Image (cartoon, grey):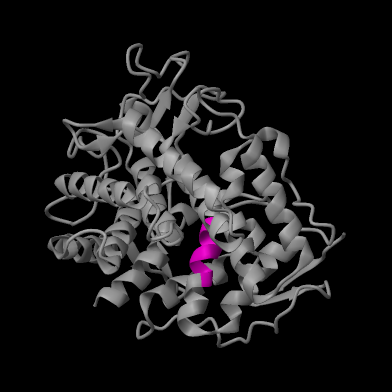
Amino acid sequence: MNITLKILGLVIVIMWSSCAGPPVEENSLEVDANQPIYVQMANSEIQRNPDPRLIEFRTEPKWEYTNGLLCLAILRVWEKTDNPVYYDYVKTYADSMITAEGKILTYNIRDYNIDRINPGKLLLELQEDTPHQKYGLAIETLREQMDGQPRTSEGGFWHKKRYPYQMWLDGLYMGSPFLAAYASKNNKPEIFDDVVKQVMLMDAHMYDEEKKLYYHGWDESRDMDWANDETGLSPHFWGRAMGWFSMALVDILDYLPADHPGRPEIISIVNKVAEGIVLYQDEETGVWWQILDMAGRKGNYLEASCSSMFSYFLLKAVNKGYIGTAYKEAALKAFEGVKNEFIARTDDGTISLKQICAVAGLGGNPYRDGSYEYYVGEPRRDNDPKGVGPFIMAAIEYEKMK
């Protein structure tokens, strides 16, 4: 189905009858320092990216995990404010990327790329408010991918089909909260066991007892050049990888039943993560370094996305009672540190989140070796959704705590 999207200033006009919602009023996206900071950031982001398909500096629409992350954060702002502008923004993305027949545009199930599952969280939530057959069909397509996702010998999801036998911390956030939400909403309790298994496998293979941190990746086959010949682990503790992992844990617990036998185990891992990351929280600023355990090393830097993710994790874990109130000070210091260190007000009145690592992975072509020089040498940019989304969600948790 052809869709014409016209952007008139701050007004989004979708020339398609199935895309509901009134146009954005001129004053509905103002950025005022008296607003909650999650509203300021949401309004700033929609001003910067009035077409939700084109975030992350794209020129072509894409079904991508970053769209899912940012739109989920915007949906949380809608829940707090009841302002339809935010709901319509998210629904615009879903409706423009899924055809009436339920086909997800730009998506190929045969890639078995776990990143592509993340936007499915939006569909599960939108379906509750505006049931639509095409949402259900798209959700089942994503569920079908996870049914066929290649696995390690122990049952752990490969990160992508083209990365055989590899589990990355990132992948837990991309796939497992979706599966937990799907299981909860569709009365599929057997899926919860698989979700818990994914957490336990990462904990078993990727945790370092001495450092109290998790490595970015693990290659069961040891075939990758970055993989340690004995352990299969990548060389470093990358901040955002642990950030994805930490956010996944507290989001999975939103859906995992209180009486599930794996719930205490996951809460125990939440406590392990909290214990580890506060050891590496920068004492002066309250935020975290790109390579967590190498503070001050030449080239290393304080990084906004992992700091926002850890803020969200700590604030939510304290608010939910998963970790003790002894972590409250660290949680507050973390979010306040992000605001002080990385938030800047621009000339047009919007706010920006600065100093975000653009992207970092393992393997691929050109090859990414997971070295220290690789991680600290990757480009940095402002307002990347991998930082903005967690910042918005952390801000909401911060308000709850305060």
Image height of 205 relative to 14, above or below: above
| Whether residue 261 is visible | yes
Q: Is residue 234 left or right of residue 149?
A: left
Quadrant in the picture for residue 354 = bottom left
Which is nearer the eye, 296 or 390? 390
Which residue: 60% across, 75% down? 87
Image height of 54 relative to 349, above or below: above
**Residue 146: percent from left, percent from top:** 62, 41
**Residue 9: percent from left, percent from top:** 65, 76
Q: Quadrant of the N terminus?
A: bottom right
Q: Is residue 211 left or right of residue 263?
A: left
* Magenta-tinted stretch: 69-75
- Main SS of residues in magenta: helix
| Whether residue 355 is visible | no
Q: Is residue 95 left or right of residue 306?
A: right
Which residue: 47% across, 26% down? 154
Quadrant in the picture for residue 144 = top right
**Residue 303: percent from left, percent from top:** 31, 48
Q: Is residue 271 left or right of residue 359?
A: left
Which residue: 40% across, 41% down? 199
**Residue 37: percent from left, percent from top:** 37, 75
